[in-house]
Amino acid sequence: MATSTERKIRALAAVKSPACVGIDLAGVEHRETGVALLRDGRLELLTSAWTDEEILRLAALAGRRGTVAVNAPLTRPMGRCCLDDDCPCRQDPGTRSRQLERELARMRVPTLATALIKVLARRGERIAAALRRSGREPLEVYPFATLKLLGLPWRGKRTPEGRRAIHQGLRPLVPGLRRPGASEHQLDAVVCALTAHLHRKRLTRTVGLAEEGLMVIPDIEIFALEYERDPSGRGLRAVWKRRRRRRE
Ligand SMILES: [Zn+2]
C-alpha cells in the first residue's frame, strides 16, 4: 500500500467516532476489493485491498460502534450446508437462491443467485464470520440496488464514461468525493458505505428472511431525495427528506 495511504489509515485508526466502511468484495485475493470510509456521511478514505487481512484491517476503521457494509452474499440459501453443486444439500428448485434475491427480482433489481456466484459467496461468508468474531455484525448490501432505487446513474461502470457519470451522480450525496478516476470497485465501495450511512439514519429497510439472510436497501417510501445548492456555492448537495414516520 502506498505510504500516503498507510499514513492515512494510521491516522483514521486513532479516530474514536463511529464510521461507515463499505467493501466491494472480490471473489479472490488477486482481484481488487474496493474500500471506502464515510464519517458523518463524508468520504474520508477511498482505497483498494487484496488479502482478507488487509480488508479486515480496513473494516476495523469503522470503530467499535461503526457499521461495515459488504457487497457480497454473506449467507447461504436456507437448507444448504455448502454451495457445492454435487452435495445432496442442493435440490432444485429453490436452493440456488435466497428469498432476498427473489424479492429483488420482483422489484426489477436483478441479481445473480448465491449458488451462481459461489466463489464470492464463500469469501463473503468467511469475511462476515471474521467480522462477527471481532464484534461487528456486517450488513449485506448491493450497490446496484442502492443506485437504482435512489434514481442515480448505474450504467456502464466498466467504461470511463460510465464511471464518470456514476461519480457525478454520487457527488451531491457523498461530500468529499472528488475521485473521477476511481475504479468501478472503489465506486461500488462508496455506494456500500453510503448505504451503511443511510442505515444509521434509519432510511433503509431489509429484503429477505431473518433466518436466512437479509440485505439492506434504501427505503424510498420513507424519504425523497432532493437537491439544493451547496453552501460552498459549487455544485449541489443532496437532502434526505423524510416523507412520513417510519412504519413499524
Ligand atoms: Zn452441502
Image (tube, rainbow, N blue to C red):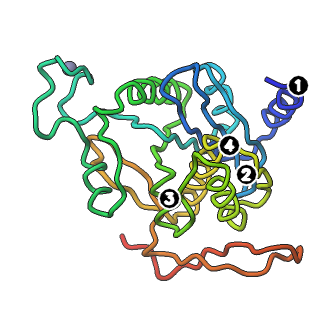
Query: Looking at the image, how many numbered discs can be counted on the residues?
Result: 4
Residue 36's mark?
4
Relative to residue 49, is residue 222 drawn left or right? left
Residue drawn at (86%, 73%) of the image: 234
Give the quadrant of the N terminus.
Answer: top right
Asked if marks 2 and 1 touch (Cβ < 8 Å), the reply is no
> In this orientation, which residue lies closer to the viewer: 107 or 62?
107
Looking at the picture, does residue 201 appear above or below residue 129?
Answer: below
Disc 3 residue type (three-letter): Thr
SS at mark 1? helix
Residue behind mark 2: 39
Q: Are marks 4 and 2 in contact (CB under 8 Å)?
A: no
Q: Amino acid at mark 2?
A: Arg
Cα distance between the residues tagged 2 and 1: 22 Å
Looking at the rendered structure, the kind of residue marked 1 is Thr
Q: Position of residue 169 (x, y in %)?
A: 65, 65
Q: Within 8 Å: ligand 1 and the Cβ of disc 2?
A: no
Label 2 secondary element: strand
Of residues 4 and 117, the one nearer the viewer is 117
Instruction: Identify the residue shown where x is 44% and y is 53%.
Output: 216
Can you identify the residue that label 1 sits on?
3
Describe the element under mark 4 as helix, strand or loop: strand
